[in-house]
Amino acid sequence: MKKIIWLSDIHLNLLPKNGIATFVEIIKKRPSDTIWISGDIAEADSVVDFLSTMESEFEQPINFVLGNHDYYLGFFNEVRFKIRKLCSESGRLCWLNDSDVVEVTKEVGLIGHDSWADGRFGDYKNSDLLLNDYFMIWDFNPFVKKDVSGKQSFPGGIKNILSHFTSTQAKQSRLLKMQALAAEAVQHIEMHLCDSLKKYKKVFFLTHVPPFREACWHQDKISDDNGLPHFSCKIVGDTLIRIMKQYPDRHLTVLCGHTHCRAEAQILDNLKVFAAHAEYGIPEIQKIFKL
């Protein structure tokens, strides 16, 4: 039997050193064969350091995806370059975006991808929600300029920035970026899920963004049309449903985070999703799977 610890939205950059040590000890007291993390490990300037720390503290493999916070204060390409370099030099860290199916047992496989909210659930056009993502991830923020020292600056003043971010043009530009990131996840699923289902009776899909409305909760209920566009990925969910209908004798379990609100939903007879609960500064073990 294999034991897997599932973590999500642990935001280690918000913990003091003794808090990190305490969390490490909590995990060590629950023996496991593998650790899975469904994103939001830290931020762009610290995620590599924290993953390295986890590798040094634990003997078991660590399979992970990145969340939106893992790109804060950084560019997508720069963060991904650092993550790829880290994993290439590690024997136990695996970023699932760059991985084929990982064998868990002879009957169980694991695939995963960061994914991204795609604006297709809810009412993106009329949503007035402005996530920190759009200011703190430099690919979304056209006002961020790098000087020769590599430091970021925000020319134009706060009024100019806010005026831009609430414009129709800016909303459409963000949506195109969001949907391009979601399309990367779909491409990964199309490439690996069918082959995984042919080989394994049960497959886990680790991701950050809930791919189903039923798993996207806020304040003890499914998110409303204002929030859903920013916290769920419909195109990934549609892809998973379509593929699982082709394999009725196989089972897929989706593990996600992002909303910080626990949810559990049976989407099909052979497709179930778990969303993680989380509180900033209080990381926890979401679940221990025994396979």
Image: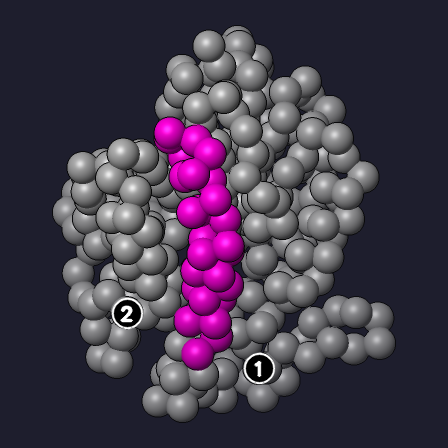
Position above or below: 21 against 273: above
Q: Which residue does the numbered mark 1 point to in the structure image?
A: 142
Q: Is mark 1 in CB contact (under 8 Å) with mark 2?
A: no
173 versus 249 height, above or below: below
Q: 160 above or below 94?
A: below
Whole-percent x and y of residue 259? 33, 48
Q: Quadrant of the C terminus?
A: top left
Q: Residue at x 22, y 54 (%)?
A: 213
Residue 41: tell me if it is visible: no
Find disc 2 in the rendering and name its residue: 120
Nearest to N terminus: mark 1 or mark 2: 2
Q: Quadrant of residue 236?
A: bottom left
Would you say residue 119 is visible in this rendering?
yes
Magenta range is 176-203
Residue 94 rendering spot, x and y as whole percentages: 64, 38
Q: Secondary structure at mark 2?
A: loop
Task: Name which residue type carries label 1.
Answer: Pro
